[in-house]
């Protein structure tokens, strides 16, 4: 899966997928073969952190 490269677009894309299709970030990453730590790092660079309670990057 080719994810968006722009971090702001990426956070929107991932949050939409998490909201509509996945119960956890781990499930999303497994399905799309994405390294979870790389994703967290990329989104952290634009001040987004994963919140397990809401299952989204905030």
Image (spheres, helix red, strand yellow):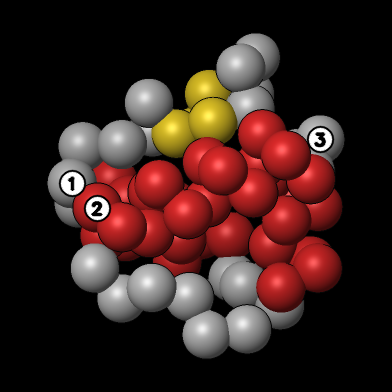
Pointer 1 or 3: first along the chain: 3
In the image, taking residue 35 as reference, residue 46 lies left or right, namely left
Residue 44 visible in the picture: yes
Which quarter of the figure is the C terminus placed in?
top left
Label 3 sits on a secondary structure element that is loop
Crowding around mark 3 (Cα neighbors within 10 Å: few <14, some 14 to 19, many 20+) is some
Residue at 24% x, 52% y is: 8
Label 2 sits on a secondary structure element that is helix
Residue 41 visible in the picture: no
Position of residue 52 relative to residue 29, above or below, is above
The outermost residue toward the left is: 46
The outermost residue toward the top is: 53
Which residue is label 1 attached to? 46
Q: How far apart are the alpha carbons under marks 1 and 2?
A: 8 Å
Which residue is label 3 attached to? 23
In the image, taking residue 43 as reference, residue 6 lies left or right, namely left
* Circle 1 or circle 2, nearest the eye: 2
* Residue 4 image point, x, y percent: 38, 73
Please tell me in which quadrant of the rendered image residue 21 appears.
Answer: top right
Label 1–label 2 contact, CB within 8 A: yes
Residue at 79% x, 66% y is: 30
Picture disc at residue 8: 2
Q: How far apart are the alpha carbons under marks 2 and 3?
A: 22 Å
Label 1–label 3 contact, CB within 8 A: no
Residue at 52% x, 85% y is: 2
Please tell me in which quadrant of the rendered image residue 19 appears.
Answer: top right
* Residue 24 image point, x, y percent: 75, 39
Which quarter of the figure is the N terminus placed in?
bottom right
Pointer 2 or 3: first along the chain: 2
Picture disc at residue 26: none
Please tell me in which quadrant of the rendered image residue 9 appears.
Answer: bottom left
């Amino acid at each position: 899966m080719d994810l968006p490269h722009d971090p702001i677009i990426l956070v929107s894309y991932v949050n939409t997928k998490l909201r509509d299709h996945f119960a956890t970030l781990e499930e999303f990453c497994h399905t799309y073969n994405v390294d979870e730590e790389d994703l967290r790092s990329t989104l952290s660079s634009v001040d987004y952190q994963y919140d397990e309670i809401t299952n989204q990057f905030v």
